[in-house]
Structures are given as C-alpha cells and as structure tokens.
Image (cartoon, rainbow, N blue to C red):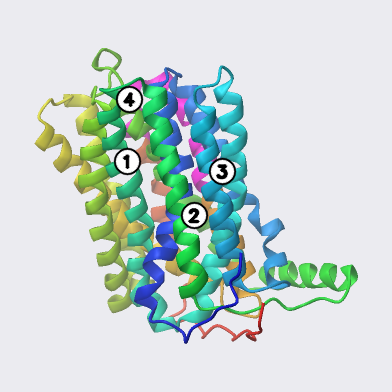
C-alpha cells in the first residue's frame, strides 16, 4: 500500500481521533467483543476469561520486536500496513464462525489480529509522542484515550446492539458474522484514510548489518533500565490495573449471565445499550476530564486522585451483584459512574509512561516497553479472574477487586514523579 503521499502536517485533531479509534477496534474486538461472542455461543466463564486474557499477550511481548520499528521505514508505514492486515483478518473471522471447528480457527485469527494490532500500537504511540509537544501530549491525552474508547462505544455499543437485533432475525453465528465483517471493512477504510492524512513520524535509524541491529536492540534495552527510578515506576505500572484487569474480563459476563446464576440477565441488545453506549459515553467524558485535570494539576499531584477515582466506583458492581436490580435506568446509572471513574483514572498511567519513561533516544521503543508491562498487569489478573469468580461468586468477586486495587494506592504516594518531563529527543524524518 502506498503511503508516500504526504501532505503538509495536518492538525492533530484530524488524525489523533481516527488513529486511536483504529487502535481501539481490534483491541476491543479481542478483549471485550470476543468474550461476548463466545458467551453467546455457550462457553463457560473460566474458558472465556482464560483464552481472551491470553490473547492480550502480544501487547505484553511487543518490546521484543518494538526496536525493529526504530530501524526501518516510518511509523506511518507500519500504522497503515497493519490496519489493513487487521481489517482483512477480522473479516476472515466472520467467515469462520459457521464452521464446525470455529473456535480453533477464530482463535488462530484472533492471535494474528492481536500480533498485528499490538505492533500497530507501537507505531501509533510513537507517532503521537514524536509529533506532539509535551503540552500537546497532555492536552490530547484525554482525546487519545477518549477516541480509543469511541471504538468501545462503536463496537461494544452500536455493533453489539446491532448484533442483538440480528439475533432476533437469525441465529447468533450469522448475526456475529455481520458484526466482524463490518469491523473488518471499517479498518480497511481507515487504513486508506491514514495513508493520506497521517504525519510521517520519525523514520527508523537504518542499520547496515545484523550486528548493528543487535547493537541497537541492546542499546534500547540497556538505556531503558538506566532511566532514573525505573524499577519503582515499572512495579507501579504493573499494579496500576490489577483491579481493572479482573473487572473487564468478568463485568461484561456478569451483565449477560442468567439471573439464576447471579448475573443481571441482560439481552445482547440491552448490554450494548447500557454498557457499550451509556457506559462508554461516561468513560469518554471521564477520560477527557482526566486529561485536562492532569494537565492543570500536574502528574505528581494528580496521580493519587486519579487512582482513587479509577477504583472506588467499582463499588457499583458490588451493588449490582448484591441487589440484582431490574430497573434499566438504575443499572445504566451505576455502570456509567463506574466507567467515568475508569476513564478518569486511566489517563494517569498513560501520562506516567509518556512523561516519566518514554523521553529519550528511543522514545518509541521505551514507551512500548512500559505499555506492554501495563498490559501484562491487565492480562495476568484476567487469566485467573474466571476461576476466582467461579469460586467466590459474582458479589464476593467484585469485593475482591476492590482489595486488589490497594497496592497501587499505596505506591502512588511513594514513587518519585518529576514536576515535568524533559522534551522528547527529536528523531530524524526521512522518506519511507
């Protein structure tokens, strides 16, 4: 695909929203939509939580290949290419759903989507960091996170509502074929838009030999672990999402599970409307508010409030799993409060990685290192969340989630945060 056409650098508002929308579609297809799909096809919670959590592994392993993006082509080249591949792969998932061994084939394609999407994320975040100033990064962090979750609104909201409607007209498999086919077409379309609109980003530092490549890779790793206070920061990032990593796996399953089993018994259409629509609007509002809150107060002073606001609203799930209300407005209100807090607090870990860890010679790779560890902190709790929930039941599970957030709250008062990050080192721009 030709990405050489490069207009004058466009305003961030013309590409930041679409870039993170495109980043969000495959991530939510794997982390959220796949779980609902398999639940509608009758799979148990522990199997769903285990496999959909392991599908997040490429987001944690991407540091092993992220230095390659520092060596070849431009960030724009990788973004456009992988958006196209992911779009085609999602369409192939749709075609596999009617097959007898659909689980095997769709899981293999989800693995491919996960690898390509996680690599796309490296380039996307690198483009964001290298193209925007520190002040712009802080100001657009809310929009970055917000439009990443517009993808949640669209996929788990609009598309799931459509899936629920189609389930009333046909069987679940064919309904979800239409959904995954639509996601694939959208990603292909966005890749064509980005081929024209994205800034090129910094080009790779071209190596003349494998020896030079190995030396660059080693330098990336060594310089990362020489950063000030890096171990404190990494432990904190790993624990930041310990509670969320379990809620995002089990929360949606709780909402659609049968009331006789302790769930709320929402239909697919109700789930899409309440969780995917009202909840995601609340998340976006919280994400934008959190970005401006942090820009105003500064990361050091804002970090503890961000974590508190992120985790305390999980009490909403404790209430829902205890009272099992049937009033849709009450359910929507409780989930919206939880999602607003989640969005508000999520900004903190993003800016921590951008401003305390990424700046330096290899900002793209170093941000990818930190981001992968953050996703490992999401994946590890998620892999065991299904067994914990089945052992404790929904109500006690959500109480446990609150307890799991305490270590991050403690560390927020201990980790060293600079008053401001040094500007990222500019990387040379060359033609791909």
Q: In this image, 188 relative to 72: left or right?
A: left
**In the displayed structure, would residue 225 be above or below residue 325?**
below
Question: Residue 213 placed where, x, y %?
Answer: 82, 70
Coordinates of residue 201 in the picture (x, y in percent): 56, 78
Q: Which residue is mark 4?
A: 394
- Is 82 colored magenta in this rendering? no
**Circle 2 sits on which residue?**
188
Q: Are the residues tagged 1 and 3 within 8 Å (C-beta)?
A: no
Distance between the alpha carbons at the discs numbered 1 and 3: 18 Å
Q: Which residue is mark 3?
A: 89
- 174 sits to left or right of 82: left
Closer to the N terminus: mark 1 or mark 3?
3
**Stretch of the chain drawn in magenta:** 377-400
Determine the CA span between mark 2 and mark 4: 39 Å
Residue drawn at x 27%, y 58% as measured from the top left: 284
Q: Secondary structure at mark 1?
A: helix
* Badge 1 or badge 2: first in the primary sequence: 1
Q: Residues within 10 Å of mark 3 (few under 14, many from 20)?
A: many
Q: Secondary structure at mark 4?
A: helix
């Amino acid at each position: 695909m030709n990405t050489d056409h490069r207009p004058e650098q466009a305003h961030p508002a013309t590409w930041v929203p679409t870039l993170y929308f495109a980043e969000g579609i495959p991530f939510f297809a794997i982390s959220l939509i796949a779980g609902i799909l398999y639940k509608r096809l009758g799979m148990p919670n522990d199997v769903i939580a285990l496999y959909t959590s392991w599908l997040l592994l490429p987001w944690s392993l991407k540091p092993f290949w992220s230095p390659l993006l520092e060596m070849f082509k431009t960030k724009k080249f990788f973004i456009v290419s992988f958006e196209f591949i992911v779009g085609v792969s999602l369409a192939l998932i749709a075609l596999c759903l009617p097959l007898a061994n659909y689980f095997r084939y769709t899981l293999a394609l989800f693995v491919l989507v996960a690898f390509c999407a996680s690599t796309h994320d490296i380039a996307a975040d690198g483009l964001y960091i290298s193209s925007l100033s520190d002040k712009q990064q802080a100001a657009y962090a809310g929009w970055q996170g917000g439009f990443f979750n517009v993808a949640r609104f669209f996929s788990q909201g609009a598309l799931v509502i459509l899936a629920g409607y189609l389930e009333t007209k046909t069987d679940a498999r064919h309904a979800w074929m239409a959904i995954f086919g639509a996601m694939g077409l959208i990603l292909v379309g966005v890749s064509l838009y980005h081929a024209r609109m994205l800034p090129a980003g910094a080009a790779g530092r071209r190596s003349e030999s494998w020896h030079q490549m190995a030396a660059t890779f080693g330098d990336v790793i060594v310089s990362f672990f020489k950063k000030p206070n890096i171990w404190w920061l990494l432990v904190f990032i790993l624990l930041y999402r310990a509670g969320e990593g379990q809620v995002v796996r089990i929360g949606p399953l709780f909402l659609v599970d049968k009331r006789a089993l302790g769930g709320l018994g929402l239909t697919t259409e109700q789930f899409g409307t309440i969780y995917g629509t009202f909840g995601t609007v609340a998340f976006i509002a919280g994400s934008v508010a959190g970005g401006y809150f942090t820009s105003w107060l500064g990361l050091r002073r804002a970090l503890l409030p961000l974590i508190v606001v992120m985790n305390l609203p999980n009490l909403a799930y404790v209430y829902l799993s205890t009272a099992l209300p049937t009033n849709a407005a009450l359910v929507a209100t409780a989930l919206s409060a939880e999602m607003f807090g989640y969005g508000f607090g999520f900004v903190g870990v993003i800016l921590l990685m951008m401003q305390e860890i990424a700046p330096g010679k290899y900002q793209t790779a170093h941000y990818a290192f930190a981001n992968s560890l953050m996703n490992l902190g999401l994946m590890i709790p998620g892999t065991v969340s299904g067994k914990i929930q089945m052992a404790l039941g929904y109500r006690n599970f959500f109480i446990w989630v609150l307890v799991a957030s305490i270590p991050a709250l403690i560390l927020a008062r201990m980790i060293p945060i600079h008053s401001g990050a040094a500007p990222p080192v500019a990387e040379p721009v060359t033609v791909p």
